[in-house]
Amino acid sequence: MELSYFHIYHGDLLLNEEEYIINRIELDGRDFPTLDSFYEVFARKMNATAYFGYNLDALFDVLVDYDFERVDRFVWVVNHSADFLREESIEKKVAFYETLFDAANTAHVEPILAKIKSKAILYYFDFSQNIKEVLDRGFLIYQEI
């Protein structure tokens, strides 16, 4: 079964958090007009301020090196996604989402035995034409829920 990393949700988002141990980070897209503003908060939330390089390579590295020994799912929820990275060019937005996708693909750990839960990074964005346009432009797979 192919895992969708990007989800666009309509209305309230309810995640079944009882089945998995989840580290859930919620972001308000209005607070992140640029990548620099995002990196600042991301580094702090990930306890990586001492070594974070504030670029897409560093973002990838921190996501891939995330401690999946303690959690099954690392979930980002972005509300007001129409305003997320609103001051960045479409090319920078696409590069950002491609980095998220690549990190999720790299970090995804398939269970060896059926009894072991899979590990994954998942991204949820509330519905906006902006997010759909960027994901489509980058040919990134997403699921509307």
Image (cartoon, rainbow, N blue to C red):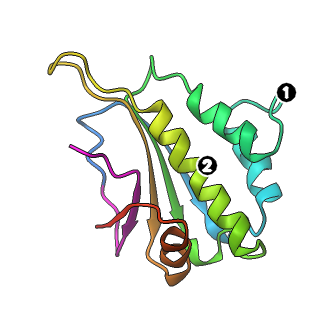
Q: Nearer the viewer, mark 2 or mark 1?
A: 2
Amino acid type of the residue that numbered disc 2 sits on in the rendered structure: Thr
Any mark on residue 14, and which? none
29 left or right of 120 in image: right
Answer whether residue 4 is magenta in the image. yes
Amino acid type of the residue that numbered disc 1 sits on in the rendered structure: Ala
From what the image shows, is residue 57 above or below residue 35? above
Q: Element under label 2?
A: helix
From what the image shows, is residue 127 above or below residue 68? below
Q: Element under label 1?
A: loop
- Asked if residue 23 shows in the view, the reply is yes
Q: Residue at x 23, y 35 (%)?
A: 19
From what the image shows, is residue 24 above or below residue 63? below
Badge 2 crowding class, 10 Å Cα cut-off, few under 14, some 14 to 19, many 20 or more, is some
Q: Main secondary structure of the magenta part?
A: loop
Badge 1 crowding class, 10 Å Cα cut-off, few under 14, some 14 to 19, many 20 or more, is few
From what the image shows, is residue 51 above or below residue 54? above
The CA distance from mark 2 to mark 1 is: 21 Å
Answer whether residue 81 is magenta in the image. no
The residue labelled by disc 1 is: 50
Question: Which residue is the extreme one toward the bottom?
Answer: 129
For the C terminus, the image quarter is bottom left
Please state the total of marks drawn on the protein image.
Answer: 2
Q: Quadrant of residue 33?
A: bottom right
Residues drawn in magenta: 1-14
Residue 36 is situated, as x and y percent measured from the top left of the image, at 82, 56
Residue 75 is situated, as x and y percent measured from the top left of the image, at 45, 45
Q: Residue at x 14, y 21 (%)?
A: 114
89 left or right of 17 in image: right
The residue labelled by disc 2 is: 99
> Which of the two labelled residues, at mark 2 and mark 1, occupies the earlier sequence position?
1
